[in-house]
């Protein structure tokens, strides 16, 4: 899968699918910083995925999926 900044992704968390946007791609440390798709600012730390959960192996284990959104905001698969 190819990811870019601001792509919409989701992971399985506590039995529910949670949607995030890609904030930072860090290939040197094999991390992807994700922020909730509803986050309006970067000041609230609880809106980001924890560091231990944002490694590429941890995200793949959590069922990382990439989504696309059309012009009117509907998810298209």
Image (cartoon, rainbow, N blue to C red):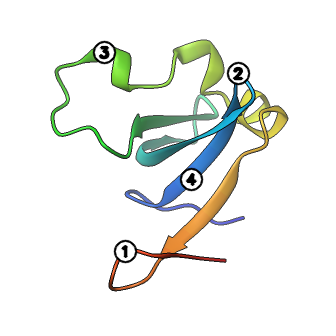
Say whether marks 1 and 2 touch (CB < 8 Å). Answer: no
Mark 1 nearby-residue class (10 Å; few <14, some 14–19, many ≥20):
few
Residue at 40% across, 25% down: 48
Residue 73 lies in quadrant: bottom left
Mark 4 nearby-residue class (10 Å; few <14, some 14–19, many ≥20):
many
Residue 23 lies in quadrant: top left
Name the residue beneath numbered marker 1: 73
Question: Gap between marks 3 and 4, in whole Å?
Answer: 19 Å
Image coordinates of residue 76 in percent, x first then y, are 58, 79
Say whether marks 3 and 1 touch (CB < 8 Å). Answer: no
Image coordinates of residue 16 in percent, x first then y, are 68, 34
SS type, badge 3? helix
Residue at 64% across, 34% down: 30
Question: Gap between marks 4 and 2, in whole Å?
Answer: 16 Å
For marks 1 and 2, the one nearer the N-term is 2
Name the residue beneath numbered marker 4: 9
2 relative to 18, above or below: below
Name the residue beneath numbered marker 3: 45
Name the residue beneath numbered marker 2: 14
Which is nearer the eye, 51 or 21?
A: 21
Mark 3 nearby-residue class (10 Å; few <14, some 14–19, many ≥20):
few
């Amino acid at each position: 899968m190819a990811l870019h900044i601001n792509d919409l992704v989701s992971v399985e968390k506590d039995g529910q699918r949670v949607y995030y946007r890609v904030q930072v791609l860090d290939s040197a440390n094999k991390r992807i910083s994700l922020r909730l798709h509803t986050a309006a600012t970067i000041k609230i730390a609880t809106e980001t995925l924890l560091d231990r959960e944002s490694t590429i192996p941890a995200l793949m284990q959590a069922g990382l999926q990439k989504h696309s959104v059309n012009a009117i905001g509907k998810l298209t698969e």
